[in-house]
């Protein structure tokens, strides 16, 4: 969703609502399947976060989407609400949703920085290296470096 103030708040909330609805459908329609299969179905059919590469990773709404993912795993595996997130990641057999979104975002930045198109290359280099905190692309790289502790693009 494009807004007049370049906020991705409504897009993330919309994706969160769709995700919750899709998870509810999987849990309802496939209630007889075991937990592993339901988890695989949710990952296959409910992870349609198209455009998440452009989300601002420091946005709190992204964290609320990750909370919805953890709640979905707890429902699928019938675990208590206070079950630790690390256990949920091991049960799901994949990285957390936030790590997936970070990975997609950084792959997008990397592809833009190595693009053959001169304009795309220039704009992405300027966003990341010069106007870092004024662009979503630059803020995402900065956020990743601060939270995961290393440079990722070079």
Image (cartoon, rainbow, N blue to C red):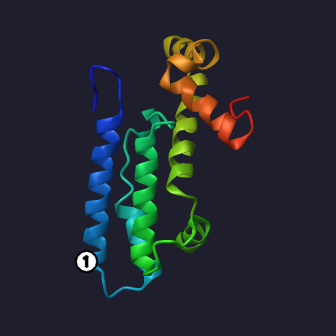
Counting from the top left corner in percent of width and height, residue 41 is at 38, 70
Q: Viewed as shown, does residue 87 lie left or right of 44?
A: right
Residue at horizontal 68%, vertical 35%?
A: 146
Q: Nearer the viewer, residue 65 or 121?
A: 65
Count of picture labels: 1
- Where is 24 relative to 36, above or below? above
Residue at horizontal 60%, vertical 20%?
A: 128
Q: Quadrant of the C terminus?
A: top right
- Where is 79 relative to 113, above or below? below
Residue at horizontal 40%, vertical 76%?
A: 76
Q: Viewed as shown, does residue 153 lie left or right of 132?
A: right
- Where is 82 relative to 55, above or below? below
The extreme bottom residue here reads 32
Counting from the top left corner in percent of width and height, residue 36 is at 47, 79
The residue under label 1 is 28
Crowding at mark 1 (Cα within 10 Å: few <14, some 14-19, many 20+): few
Residue at horizontal 52%, vertical 26%?
A: 137
Is residue 116 visible in this depiction of the protein? no
Is residue 69 visible in this depiction of the protein? yes
Q: Viewed as shown, does residue 13 lie left or right of 54?
A: left
Counting from the top left corner in percent of width and height, residue 104 is at 52, 42
Q: Nearer the viewer, residue 60 or 16?
A: 60
The extreme front residue here reads 82
Counting from the top left corner in percent of width and height, residue 118 is at 54, 11
Which element type, helix, strand or loop, lies under badge 1? helix
Q: Quadrant of residue 91?
A: bottom right
Q: Nearer the viewer, residue 89 or 47?
A: 89
């Amino acid at each position: 969703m494009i807004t007049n103030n370049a906020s991705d708040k409504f897009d993330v909330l919309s994706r969160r609502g769709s995700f919750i609805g899709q998870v509810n459908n999987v849990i309802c329609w496939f209630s007889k399947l075991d937990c592993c299969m339901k988890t695989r179905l949710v990952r296959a059919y409910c992870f349609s976060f198209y455009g998440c590469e452009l989300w601002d990773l420091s946005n709190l709404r992204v964290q609320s989407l990750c909370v919805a993912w953890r709640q979905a795993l707890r429902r699928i595996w019938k675990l208590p609400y206070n079950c630790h997130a690390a256990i949920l990641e091991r049960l799901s057999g994949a990285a957390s949703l936030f790590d997936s979104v970070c990975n997609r975002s950084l792959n997008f930045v990397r592809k833009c920085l190595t693009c053959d198109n001169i304009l795309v290359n220039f704009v992405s280099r300027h966003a990341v290296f010069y106007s870092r905190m004024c662009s979503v692309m630059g803020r995402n790289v900065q956020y990743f470096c601060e939270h995961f502790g290393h440079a990722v693009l070079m």
